[in-house]
Amino acid sequence: MPDIRVVVVGPKFEGNVGAIARCMANFGVEDLVLVNPCEIGETAMNRSKHGDYILRNARTVTSMEEAVEGCLLVVGTSGTVTKGDKNYARIPVDVREFAMDCRGYNEKIAFVFGREDIGLLQTELNRCDVLITIPADDKYPVMNLSHSVGVILYEMFQANRRPVRCEPCDGREKELLFQFFGDLLEEIDYNEARRESTTVMFRRMMGRAIPTKYEYNTIMGVFGDAARIIRNYQESGTKWGGK
Amino acid sequence: MPDIRVVVVGPKFEGNVGAIARCMANFGVEDLVLVNPCEIGETAMNRSKHGDYILRNARTVTSMEEAVEGCLLVVGTSGTVTKGDKNYARIPVDVREFAMDCRGYNEKIAFVFGREDIGLLQTELNRCDVLITIPADDKYPVMNLSHSVGVILYEMFQANRRPVRCEPCDGREKELLFQFFGDLLEEIDYNEARRESTTVMFRRMMGRAIPTKYEYNTIMGVFGDAARIIRNYQESGTKWGGK
């Protein structure tokens, strides 16, 4: 995963800076650089929650040039997408596409975020090697500053992690489940003509759900118990309500 | 795209509710239902920005059951992921996976978000048909409430849109660009032995960049002009600095 630096140019509301620090902690990013920020006080600290250490370690500098020093790639962010393709400095790529493209990198990448009201200036955009955007509704595509940071770091995090899954049931266990289901149909004296199609339906439904070991075992327990109880009643000659 | 309802259960900070309304506007979602919320006043209105109409139209109800009425699917959200697979009510699927899976639906889906401190109660989780989570850093996976809403609506929006691209250059234009590049190498008397590998390198670099029509045309203009100027100088017998 690239080594990410978050650069915030001229933030006006410290609450946003605090929320940015929290988002960074949420996605394991720690390097925060502020360019000529507003005063960062208690409100920012409160909003940063467990990301407070990131806020405390943030560097403050006076120019964007200084902020991106040592970075291989400078990535600008913009909520305003240019429709034509001639204002070159304002043509962005989608954040997901960018995140996928730079999965192989281990180098430092700076993500530069602009002011709450006017974003990044043209000169600042021109310094960026890549411009990314978060696709959103045409009628109101401009997200809150810290929410943009959240989505972008989320995409970077997703592109670089392996999904965690509960262990699915193996094939042998699965067949046992279908066998238990078949036993249950047998015990309830299920309509012979529909038995096969119901069995297939159940198999397909389970196939779509890709259940875990625990789920298979639980359902199997239910079917097994039900079949056993019915059988016991029948064997003991007790009448049951069903027929 | 599914018809999305955002349900927020017991929010304690009106600022979060305002930020949620803004996120909803950002991703074209309008149906907001609040279950026993804190007072919603000016702070919420300010934070909602152009999403203020969503906040004004929000319904307030007194139970989650009432809030999800009329929805095909009730989707719970949780920042706390259970490691084992036995506490069934707390096993979530990743938000992206869920967003991709329900692309075909046009029905109403409720996304239910819990309180800022304790999230959704066990009884509320049990009422959910699906539980989704935003994968994040193990050390601090719990996002701010409105930021969670932002990421989840972003994923739903992404799963249901077509990417917009600038028109890429067509094959004929591209070959013309490579011809202009070759002309330039010729005019600058580029090292014969390296000419082929440099040409291939340039082709591959352009292949990776997938430039737009505008980009190809611009670069072609530069190469063409450079080659022409050098040729003119040479034809007029003027000495040039290069050799």
Image (cartoon, coloured by chain):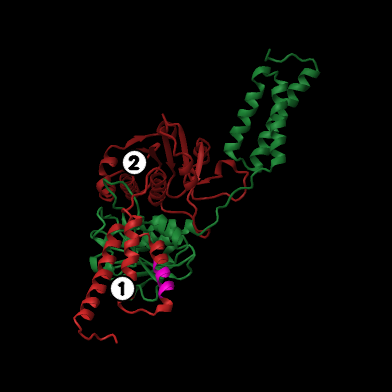
Chain colours: A red, B green
Quadrant assignment for the C terminus of chain A? bottom left
Is B94 on the left or on the right of A85, as rendered? left
Residue B41 in sight from this viewpoint: no
Which amino acid type is shown beneath numbered disc 1? Leu
Q: Is residue A201 magenta?
A: yes
Instruction: Name the spot of residue B103 as percent of width and height, x first.
Output: 48, 62
Q: Nearer the viewer, residue A96 or A53?
A: A96
Chain under numbered label 1:
A
**Dividing the picture into quarters, in which one does residue B179 lie?**
top right
What segment carries the magenta color? A195-202
Chain under numbered label 2:
A
Relative to A87, residue B96 above or below: below
Q: Which residue is mark 2?
A: A29
Q: Nearer the viewer, residue A9 or A219?
A: A219
Is B214 on the left or on the right of A79, as rendered? right
Quadrant assignment for the N terminus of chain A? top left
Residue occupying the point 50% across, 53% down: A135
* Residue closest to the far right: B236
Q: Which residue is mark 1?
A: A184
Relative to B198, residue B16 above or below: below
